[in-house]
Image (cartoon, rainbow, N blue to C red):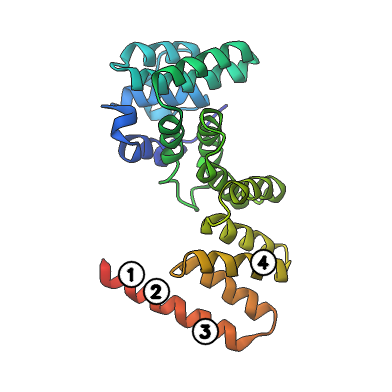
């Protein structure tokens, strides 16, 4: 699978800067590139020289460079994706189980969830990479509502609405007071012109997070489409207040 030079930049930055230090330990870009190539099958061409020839060799090289159990556990979780892609599910499960013997399942899951947090909405080419990382998170800890929420968000950005809805519904099932999946599902329903359902979701998002700027923006659009100019203006005014408050903090 080919990629452009910029494809993995946000994900690599997330690995380098957003990954929790206790879960990963010290990282270098040669190790990062081998890990990403091992687990996802992609690497930036500019960094290809830092990766051993084949994807399987990249997995082995990353394991060799792992200097503690937590790092090794993360690499094994990555290699489980390689085996999964090869259709060798026995080896995939073996690697993931070994990873979970080295790293607490919640810590491992949250680490792969955190890897995706710096992927920006406009960086659409990184969505598939992020979804793969989140898949590792869920295999490590199936109760991770945040991972389901993020997968749903990335599928929403890809306009794959059915997959987005399945994952957002699961996030809400696991944590029914989690504002983010309500907002994302509200946006999805707004885009599908399901205005009453969208309004219900966005109301809940704001109830659970009263400074949720993006939820107010989306709800203002719902009100506008429903012909409710007064409530649309109230939400637009609230957006301006939140933007002004955020600017003062910078």
Name the residue tied to disc 4. Answer: 198
Q: Secondary structure at mark 2?
A: helix
Name the residue tied to disc 3. Answer: 234
Classify 10 Å Cα crowding around label 1: few (below 14), some (14-19), many (20 and above): few
Which of these two is toward me, 111 or 97?
A: 97
Classify 10 Å Cα crowding around label 2: few (below 14), some (14-19), many (20 and above): some
Q: Give the vertical position of 225 relative to 24 (above or below).
A: below
Q: Earlier in the sequence, mark 3 or mark 1?
A: 3
- Image quarter where the C terminus lies is bottom left
Q: Give the vertical position of 199 relative to 83 (above or below).
A: below
49 with respect to 169 (left or right) = left
Q: Residue at x 32, y 16 (%)?
A: 66
- Image quarter where the N terminus lies is top right
Q: Secondary structure at mark 3?
A: helix
Q: Give the vertical position of 85 relative to 140 (above or below).
A: above
Whole-angstrom CA distance, mark 1 to mark 4, is 26 Å
Q: Give the vertical position of 30 relative to 4 (above or below).
A: above
């Amino acid at each position: 699978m080919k990629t452009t030079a910029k494809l993995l930049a946000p994900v690599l930055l997330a690995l380098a800067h957003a990954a929790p230090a206790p879960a990963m330990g010290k990282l270098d870009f040669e190790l990062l590139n081998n890990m990403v190539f091992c687990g996802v099958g992609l690497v930036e061409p500019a960094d290809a020289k830092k990766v051993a020839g084949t994807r399987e060799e990249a997995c082995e090289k990353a394991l060799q460079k792992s200097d503690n159990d937590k790092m090794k556990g993360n690499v094994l979780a990555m290699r489980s994706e390689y085996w999964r892609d090869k259709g060798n599910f026995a080896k995939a499960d073996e690697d993931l189980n070994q990873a979970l013997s080295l790293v607490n399942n919640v810590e491992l899951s949250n680490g792969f969830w955190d890897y995706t947090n710096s992927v920006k909405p406009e960086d659409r080419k990184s969505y598939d990479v992020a979804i793969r990382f989140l898949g590792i998170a869920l295999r490590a800890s199936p109760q991770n509502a945040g991972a389901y929420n993020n997968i749903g968000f990335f599928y929403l950005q890809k306009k794959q609405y059915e997959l987005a809805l399945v994952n957002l519904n699961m996030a809400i099932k696991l944590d029914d007071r989690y504002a983010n999946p309500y907002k994302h599902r509200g946006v999805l329903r707004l885009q599908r012109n399901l205005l009453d359902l969208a309004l219900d979701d966005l109301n809940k998002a704001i109830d659970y997070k009263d400074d949720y700027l993006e939820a107010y923006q989306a709800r203002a659009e719902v009100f506008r489409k429903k012909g409710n100019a007064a409530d649309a203006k109230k939400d637009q005014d609230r957006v301006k207040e939140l933007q002004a408050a955020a600017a003062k903090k910078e």
